[in-house]
Image: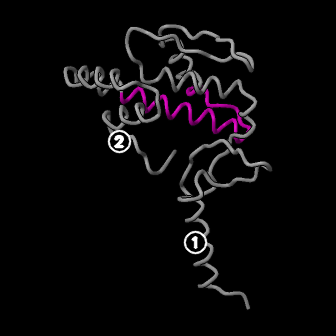
Amino acid sequence: MVRDDQIRGYGHLLDWAQERGALREIEVDQLREEAAADPDARRRALGRAWAFRRALHDCLRSVVRREPPPGASVALINSAIAESPPAFTLAQRADGIAFAIPVGPYPDLLRPVLCSALHLLSSPDLVRLRECTADRCGRLYLDHTKNGSRRWCDMGTCGNRAKARRHQARLRHPLP
């Protein structure tokens, strides 16, 4: 799993969802109010989000590694699909069809992520899915380079650290 988790609590989860456009500000405000009124529901929602994220990561990583996905992860994602009202629909687009999320009467943090994951799993971009090669990173990313040779999720962090480690190793053990 990702070593530097940015979602350390429910508030971080809501901030993440709003920053990524998964929820509108009004929906985030509504969820914050509901969470303040029911701390147990807030903890359950956060636990559900963490479990879903772990299951999705495990399934997508299995795609990258060309391994069968863990059965428990598939079951959890299928459960999220079944519990995510209202049902997903297909929407016609100029370039084909895509999953669409009908607007519901209440916000659900997982619906946009679930829809995005389902879209990726049925997309030609799936062959571009990669796992960061940096030690202890574990992030997955889409490699949009022309030749498909990207190695790190982010050059500014993981790539830079890996190159700095290699440089330090060369300084400590120079070739004769």
Q: Is residue 131 found left or right of 5 in the rendered image?
A: right
Q: Amino acid at mark 1?
A: Arg
Q: Nearer the viewer, residue 7 or 80?
A: 7
Estimate how packed mark 2 is, as few (under 14), some (14 to 19) or many (20 or more) residues with alpha carbons within 10 Å: few
Disc 2 target residue = 8
Left or right, 29 with respect to 62, comes to left
In the rendered view of the protein, which quadrant contains the C terminus? bottom right
Nearest the viewer among 73 and 167 is: 167
Q: Give the residue drawn at x 56%, y 48%.
A: 138
Q: Secondary structure at mark 2?
A: loop
Q: Residue furthest bottom?
A: 176
How would you classify the magenta stretch by its main secondary structure?
A: helix
Find out whether residue 174 is within the magenta segment: no
Q: Position of residue 131 (x, y in %)?
A: 64, 47
Quadrant of the image occupied by residue 143: top right
The verdict on residue 57 being magenta is yes
Q: Which residue position is annotated with label 1? A: 165
Q: Which residue range is magenta in the image?
A: 46-73
Q: Vertical placement of 41 versus 172: above or below?
A: above
The percent position of residue 93, horizontal first and vertical second, equals 69, 16
Is 77 drawn above or below residue 59 in the view shown? above
In the picture shown, does residue 150 fall above or below 130?
below
Which is more N-terminal, label 2 or label 1? 2
Q: Nearer the viewer, residue 118 or 92?
A: 92
User: Residue 167: x and y, percent?
Assistant: 61, 77
Distance of label 1 from label 2 (alpha carbons): 28 Å
Q: Residues within 10 Å of mark 1 (few under 14, many from 20)?
A: few
At 61% from the left edge and 78% from the top edge, which residue is drawn?
169
Asked whether, in this view, residue 37 is left or right of residue 171, the answer is left
* Kind of residue at disc 2: Arg
Name the quadrant containing residue 19. top left
